[in-house]
Image: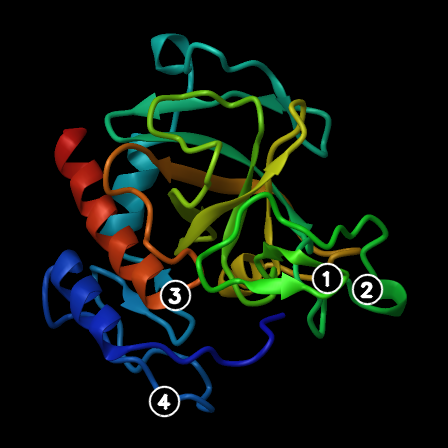
Amino acid sequence: MRMGNISRSSYFVTVVSAMLGGACVSAVPPAGSSGTPSRSSASGTVDDAGTIVGGTLIAQLLNLTKTCAGSAIIPNSHAYLLDNGTATSICALTGAIYFTADMDIDCDGIMTTHCPGTGADKDCCWQNQTSFHGPNSAYDTENPPLKSLASENTPYVVIPGDVVYPGLDQRNGGNIVAVIYNNQLEFAVFGDQGPNNVIGEASVRTANGLGIPASPASGGIGGGVTYIAFVGTGSQPSDMENLTEIQTLGAKLVQRLIANNP
């Protein structure tokens, strides 16, 4: 269930429209509306959360990442466990690494309305810190010197701390990540590190953008999520909590990825 409408700049609509091929992308409805794009096309639509829905762009990305085997597997990758007992590996393209997994909900970070949650929706293992933060992140009230992201507000993805690949910033985080599920594409950032043996976790805001149940206790989805983390120069926004910057940079990086991986 999505927790409300998230307003955003019309600049993002312009950028994504250009990336997808022009005026065929529908305009974003105003905040408070149903959130349904006014029209669609072969190139997809953009909803009020900034999620790209349908179209050829998603099909192109899924075609690039449909297999992960052999020489495409990154040198230090190993079998990362999923909730269903299967395992997945991490592979590389020119300009990105990728994996397909499930999505668990990471509620860590600044306390908000739904994190850590209450009652049946309470996160049993909530931590008040994320591994990374932006320049304008809030201070943790329990540890005032420390800043963190807010899971409910920032679309972030968790990547295991042992993933080593040139251009993936395990010191500062922030790499843009394209997350694809159910023919939808959302842009997020590398915002938290996870354990070395499991993979497939993202923030409440990421889940909301893709229509995935976002309860930290019972939400998530058991599989079918593709994560594409961009690496190298220009793959990190200056502010990992700025949604417009995340989305516009993500749009440009996707365009570059497709061009560099014919």
How many marks the image carries: the answer is 4
Where in the figure is residue 154, as x and y percent of width and height? Answer: 51, 61
Residue wearing tag 3: 243
Front residue (pair 157, 80):
157
Question: Label 2 to label 1, Cα distance in Å?
Answer: 6 Å
Q: Crowding near pointer 1: few (<14 within 10 Å), some, many (20+)?
A: many
- Quarter occupied by the C terminus: top left
Marks 2 and 1, the one that precedes in the sequence: 2
Which numbered disc, 3 or 2, marks the residue that appears first in the sequence?
2
Viewer-side label of 3, 2: 3
Q: Nearer the viewer, residue 81 or 6?
A: 6
Mark sitting on residue 121: 2
Extreme residue toward the right, this view: 119
- Extreme residue in the front direction: 145
Q: Are marks 2 and 1 in contact (CB under 8 Å)?
A: yes
Q: Which of disc 4 and disc 1 is earlier in sequence?
A: 4
Closer to the N terminus: mark 3 or mark 4? Answer: 4
Q: Secondary structure at mark 2?
A: helix
Locate residue 149, reporting x and y percent: 57, 58
Query: Between tags 3 and 4, which lies in front?
Result: 3
> Disc 3 vs disc 1: which is toward the camera?
3
Which residue corresponds to the image point at 41% horizontal and 15% vertical from the top-left? Answer: 74
The answer for how far apart the CA atoms under marks 3 and 1 are is: 22 Å
- The quarter holding residue 229 reads top left
| Residue type beneath disc 4 | Pro
Q: Badge 4, how many Cα within 10 Å: few under 14, some, many 20+?
A: few
